[in-house]
Amino acid sequence: MSKFTRLAITHALMMGGDAAMVVALADSFFFSVDLDAARTQVMLFLAVSFAPFLFVAPLIGPLIDRMAGGRRLVIQLVAGTRLVLLLMMARSIDGLALFPLVFASLVLQKTYTVSKSSLVPSTVRNERELVEANSKLGLVAGLLGGLAVVPAAGLLRTVGSEAALVYAALLFGCALLSATRLAPEVIAADPVDEEEATTLQSPSLRAGSIAMTALRANVGFTFFHLAFWLRSFDNGTVLFGAAVAASALATLTGNAIAPRVRSKIREETMLSIALAVSAVAGIGLAVVGEPAAGVVLAAVVNFVAALGRLGFESIVQRDAGNANVGRAFASFETRFQLAWAIAAFVAVAIQAPGAIGLLIVGIAAAGTFVHLRLRSGAARSSSRRRRSRRGGGRRRSSSSRGGRRRRSPRATRAPRGPARDPGPRSRSESEPPSRR
């Protein structure tokens, strides 16, 4: 069994456990409690979720990358801890203790995503397979996550939330066993040197990182904005469930078509289109202002985030040749997850009305799009000025040399008159008469 297949199986089980957990909580205290009353708890645990990405990952991540099997160990710890958390949720299904358990599980899910991203480059044979591998993992997660939902829904209907949570815990137990078969790779044996640091600060990577940060932030903001807004309607749980389902389906579709889109257009164009679509959708759906518009926006932001992720990974593969790709993926993914958490915190904190929240998503995407366009235009203008200065210097130098070449024939021109015999043409002509 190949390294990629082992990682794909582990990833499918982890995503299946996530999907089953969401279904198990659909009829629980977590979704039935008044979220306005729980807003403080939600903000607190979102604030706590900043810590792994803001402090822990930058300090511990490099050490883990230098360990043989370090990222594999992280995945094993995440799977095992989530198994325990789900069993604890099953015992606290109707109490306030459910909130910290759910948010701890969400933070661990983001931690797993970072470690998985760093492992993908070690599972492929060459760089051409890297982006395709990430796309396949997205498809596997969507398809098998959808299949895992079916038993969870059946248990929820027939037995209850507790049984569905135990089923999700079993999936994480299987993921733990599968993770033990992952290769004990050393992601980056050496620390980041000056050349790698410079490579990761290239204009293309910085612009792509900014675009992807905005896309991922919009995903986090939209999820929590809809969680509070849609719940204010009589059929709010159904609406929010539709938003979650639409988001999952849109992500699956984005992962499926992204390789084909990448073969037609440049990676930077993919990210620009993703931002433009988010901007138009957010502003346009804000005008509609209906709950259904929120469901549609959830699908749009997740779809373009899937497209943008593949485009950004292609840029890393293309322009970070002097960097350790696994470490680079982990570093960038940490930033994106932090953006998700901060945007989610903002969504809960500001308590924006429904349509205003959709408008914020559109304005954020539009502002990022305009910023990157202006930045790109300034870079092109600067490049043209540099080329113009270099070209002017070459033309002046060439003109000076040309002048000397034009004067030199006149200075060395032979005087007019009969042409001299250049010399004898044969041996007999060159000998004196006495020797003929």
Image (cartoon, helix red, strand yellow):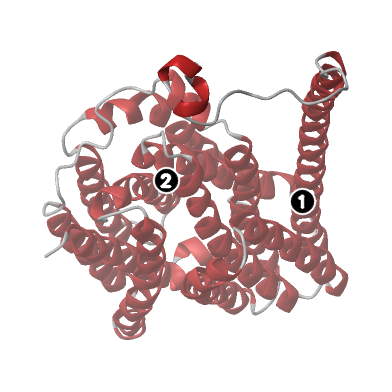
Residue 328 in picture, x, y percent from top left = 42, 38
Q: Quadrant of residue 17?
A: bottom left
Q: Is residue 393 above or below residue 270?
A: above
Element assignment for label 2:
helix
* Separation of marks 1 and 2 at Cα, in angstroms: 29 Å
- Return the residue found at the far front: 434
The quarter of the image holding the N terminus is bottom left
What is the number of callouts on the image?
2
The structure residue drawn at horizontal position 42% and vertical position 45%, both measured from the top left corner, is: 107
Q: Is residue 395 above or below residue 159?
A: above
* Residue 89 visible, this angle: yes
Residue 216 in picture, x, y percent from top left = 59, 52
* Residue 55 visible, this angle: no
Residue 392 shown left or right of residue 192 in the figure = right
Element assignment for label 1:
helix
Crowding near pointer 2: few (<14 within 10 Å), some, many (20+)?
A: many
The tag on residue 74 is none
Residue 315 in picture, x, y percent from top left = 53, 49
Residue 427 in picture, x, y percent from top left = 45, 27
Residue 97 shown left or right of residue 237 in the figure = left
The tag on residue 369 is 1
Q: Nearer the viewer, residue 265 or 303?
A: 265
The quarter of the image holding the C terminus is top left
Q: Is residue 161 above or below residue 98?
A: below
Q: Nearer the viewer, residue 79 or 26?
A: 79
Q: Nearer the viewer, residue 137 or 84?
A: 137
What residue is pinned by disc 2?
107
Residue type, mark 1 in image: Phe
